[in-house]
Image (cartoon, rainbow, N blue to C red):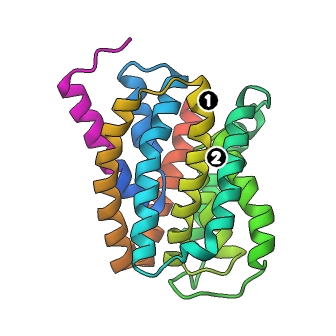
Amino acid sequence: MIDLTVELVMLLMAAAFAAGCIDAIAGGGGLITLPVLMLAGLSPAQALATNKVQGVFGAGTAALSYAARGLVDLRSQWKSALIAGAAGAAGAVLISAIPTDGLRLILPVILVGIALFFAFKPGLDDLDRTRRLTPAVFAATVVPLIGLYDGLVGPGAGAFYMIGFVTLAGYGVLKATAHTKLLNFASNLGGLAAFALVGQPLWLLGAAMGAAQIAGAMLGARLASRVGARLIKPLLVVTSTLLAARLIWQML
């Protein structure tokens, strides 16, 4: 049992605020909160579960902030959100039954590829482009695959949603970010429902960090909505690269 002093809780809340801001813009907030929770003394399973608690607040706030600015229509996206939530729950349930070692080996390579794509692909801006999959096909294929990954592994799910929306759904960068936050929220919520049964999250700590996440997510969504791709692209490149580096460091 960890000793949750006032100073430690304030530190964790500060980390959650920063994570909420970054996550609302480009994803990767778990790069901050998950290591800090483990450094605070939580076991890996409990850190993952508690991270889901506070992450739900940030992703939900970002999704609502983008929706309020007209960047995502919640009424037309609720089916995709349900699919992402169910897939996230399924991934969390299967986490002990499916070997993920091979996926963890190739994940850094994929993340570096995503970073290079957003760094050097010409013409990536906030304008919509050619759609390669219909919304129904996208919801039936891409959404459950990434949602399952989010519940099963987690890191990089936001970047995968982003690349899917940009390359397959034809969304501009800002619109893709807005829809990514909605699906991130849904798959996080589904994963949390499953983790709550086995991971024993620290609910009060998760709620305190969640309050800080809300403030950070509101700031991040406001900044992204104002600046758009000029802010989102470089931050996405940085977070994807850092996540790849962290995964490689863990393996070594």
Residue at image x 18%, y 27%? 7
Residue at image x 30%, y 38%? 208
Q: Secondary structure at mark 2?
A: helix
Question: Can you identify the residue that label 1 sits on?
Answer: 251
Local crowd size for mark 1, using a 10 Å CA cut-off: few (<14), some (14–19), many (≥20): few
Name the foreground residue: 107 vs 140. 140
Q: Is residue 252 visible?
A: no
Q: Residue furthest front?
A: 75
Name the foreground residue: 52 vs 245. 52
- Image spot of residue 172 (x, y percent): 56, 81
Question: Can you identify the residue that label 2 sits on?
Answer: 150
Residue 6 belongs to magenta span: yes
| Quadrant holding the N terminus | top left
Q: Is residue 138 visible?
A: yes
Q: Secondary structure at mark 1?
A: helix
Query: Do the numbered discs 1 and 2 sit on residues whose CB atoms are within 8 Å?
Result: no
User: Vertical placement of 186 versus 98: above or below?
Assistant: below
Residue 153 relative to residue 70: left or right? right
Local crowd size for mark 2, using a 10 Å CA cut-off: few (<14), some (14–19), many (≥20): many
Dominant secondary structure, magenta:
helix
Q: Nearer the viewer, mark 1 or mark 2?
A: 2
Name the foreground residue: 167 vs 207. 207
Residue 251: image quadrant is: top right
Name the foreground residue: 43 vs 117. 43
| Quadrant holding the C terminus | top right
Residues rendered magenta in the picture: 1-18
Kind of residue sitting beneath label 2: Asp
- First in sequence: mark 1 or mark 2? 2
Kind of residue sitting beneath label 1: Met
- Image spot of residue 118 (x, y percent): 56, 69
Q: CA distance from mark 1 to mark 2?
A: 20 Å
Q: Residue furthest top?
A: 1
